Image: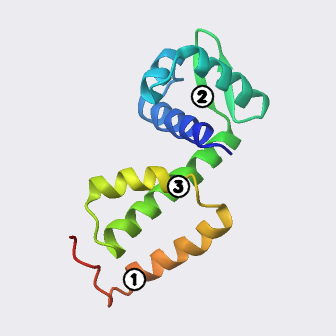
Amino acid sequence: MSESVEDFLEKVYIFTRAKNRPVKTTELAKLLNIKPPAITNMAKKLHKLGYVEYEPYIGIRLTEKGIEKAKIIMDKHRTIERFLVECLGLDKEIAYREACKLEHAMSDTVFKRFKKFVEGYSRDKRIKPPSQS
């Protein structure tokens, strides 16, 4: 799945949970910093793939399949961010930005092992994170 699709699903998930309503294409375009027609095209594509429900003039919401994928993407982001802060000692703002980049590059198979490592590290913090330089 492409980075733009993952960002799309993640933003729809966050918006619809916070507002408890579908996100309009213009709202999502602002959140993703892209033009509304690109949002409409992506919504139609993801609707055909079963990730979103899209109704013109009403908005976009995730299907169960879309919700599950968005949760995986967000879990990747949070886990990577946690690793960067707790294990590497990075500043939270830097960690957030880097996690946004890295979450898309990591396969689900690698992520499962990575997550186990981070959870284990968090339980056993005998190793101190390196100081920032």
Work out which quarter of the rendered image holds the C terminus and state it. Answer: bottom left
The residue at which mark 1 appears reads as 123
Q: Which residue is mark 2?
A: 61
In this rendering, position of residue 130 left or right of residue 66 = left
SS at badge 2? strand
Q: Which x, y percent locates residue 125?
A: 33, 85
Residue shown at 68% from the left, 26% from the top: 53
Disc 3 crowd, CA 10 A, few/some/many (<14, 14-19, 20+): many
Label 2: how many Cα within 10 Å (few below 14, some 14–19, many 20+): many
Q: CA distance from mark 2 to mark 1?
A: 37 Å
Residue 71 in the image, given as x and y percentages of width and height? 56, 50
Disc 3 to disc 1: CB gap under 8 Å: no
Marks 2 and 3, Cα distance to the nearest angstrom? 22 Å
Q: Is residue 110 left or right of residue 124?
A: right
Local packing at callout 1 (Cα closer than 10 Å; few below 14, some 14-19, many 20+) is: few
**Going from the N terminus, do you reach mark 2 or mark 1 first?**
2
Whichever of labels 2 and 3 marks the residue nearer the N terminus, that label is: 2
* Left or right of 95, for residue 106: right
> Amino acid under label 3?
Glu
Up-down relation of residue 49 to residue 92 (above or below): above
Which residue is located at x 71 percent, y 22 percent?
Answer: 44
Q: Percent from the top left, x then y, of residue 37?
A: 60, 14
Label 1 sits on a secondary structure element that is: helix
Q: Is residue 73 above or below residue 121?
A: above
Give the Cα distance between marks 3 and 1: 23 Å
In the image, 33 versus 40, the foreground residue is 33
The amino acid pointed to by label 1 is Arg
Name the residue beneath numbered marker 3.
Answer: 103
User: Where is the N terminus found, in terms of image quarters?
Assistant: top right
Residue 128 location in percent, x, y? Answer: 28, 84
